[in-house]
Image (spheres, grey):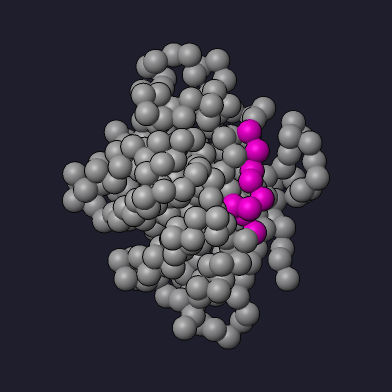
Amino acid sequence: MSELIALWPGTVADPGAPAADFVPYLKTFLLPAGVGTLGLVMVLPGGGYCNRAPHEADPIAEKFNALGFHAVVLHYRVAPFRYPEPQRDALRAIRIVRRRAAEWGVAPDKIAILGFSAGGHLAACCGTIAGQINADAGDEIDRESSRPDAMILCYPVIRFDTFGHAGSGDKLLGERSADPDVLAEFRLDTRVHSGTPPAYLWHTATDEGVPVENSIAFARAMWGLGLTAALHVFPRGPHGLGLRDTCPETVVWADLAAEFLKTNCGFPARV
């Protein structure tokens, strides 16, 4: 049975709360006890930093359960909340998973963060600019590392300017999105560093919502530093596919990502 876990002390998860009063929380999708210590995939649905797409939430966690991993879905804050609140939520969520890893049967050094579109931007933030974000809550969970061990970036927003997605930048940054210098700071392909974890990226060449150049730029930055990254570009398909079979050739992305976690990152999975 799933558990709802509020991220921050003194708060209670309420999925029905209006956006302005929203309390961020984790929803667990844990495999039964007795299957050994497994890797975990944390799912961040997309939605342009103004909502969280349901088809990129629970169904994704259930898919990765079927592929042999524990999973959680992060319901992070979106507009009217601004940067760095969504990023703080994601980093805090990783710490919570690590704190409860032994209880849940999770390998504490095998936690992947998976994000779609703007959720992909949020996931990529955790692997690139986390060092400039204070996600402390003043409790023992602060002692845990907030670094993900792998990233799965699904048609991610990597930039807000040039070939990026301006709408996500507007919602995350508010009035600051009009400042070119601020936008330059959020070109996450330029923020990749030696400590950025391995990444699996996928996109479609015909994505008109978030151009494929976002994934290409991030993968090239990873390769340029000798980091582990895989990029799969499918020839066709609209933005926001998730697991939908309207473009049948893309539905293998989750299987490919699972194999990447096992082969390139050493993630244990149930056979």
Residue 213 location, quadrant: top left
Position of 2 compared to 269: left or right? Answer: right
Say which of 234 and 231 sits in front: 234
Where, quadrant-wise, is the N terminus in this rendering?
A: bottom right
Q: Is residue 174 magenta?
A: no
Q: Is residue 55 magenta?
A: yes
**Residue at 56% across, 67% down:** 63
Count of residue discs: 0
Say which of 110 and 240 sits in front: 240
Residue 115 % position (x, y): 50, 49
On the question of residue 100 being in view, the answer is no
**Residue at 46% across, 76% down:** 269
Residue 2 to residue 31: above or below = above
**Residue at 57% across, 35% down:** 48
Say which of 43 and 236 sits in front: 236
Residue 223 % position (x, y): 21, 48
Position of 111 compared to 228: left or right? Answer: right
- Residues in magenta? 50-58
**Residue at 53% across, 26% down:** 167
Residue 59 to residue 65: above or below = above
Residue 160 % position (x, y): 43, 27
Say which of 180 and 241 sits in front: 241
Residue 24 % position (x, y): 67, 45
- Residue found at the very far bottom of the displayed protein: 34
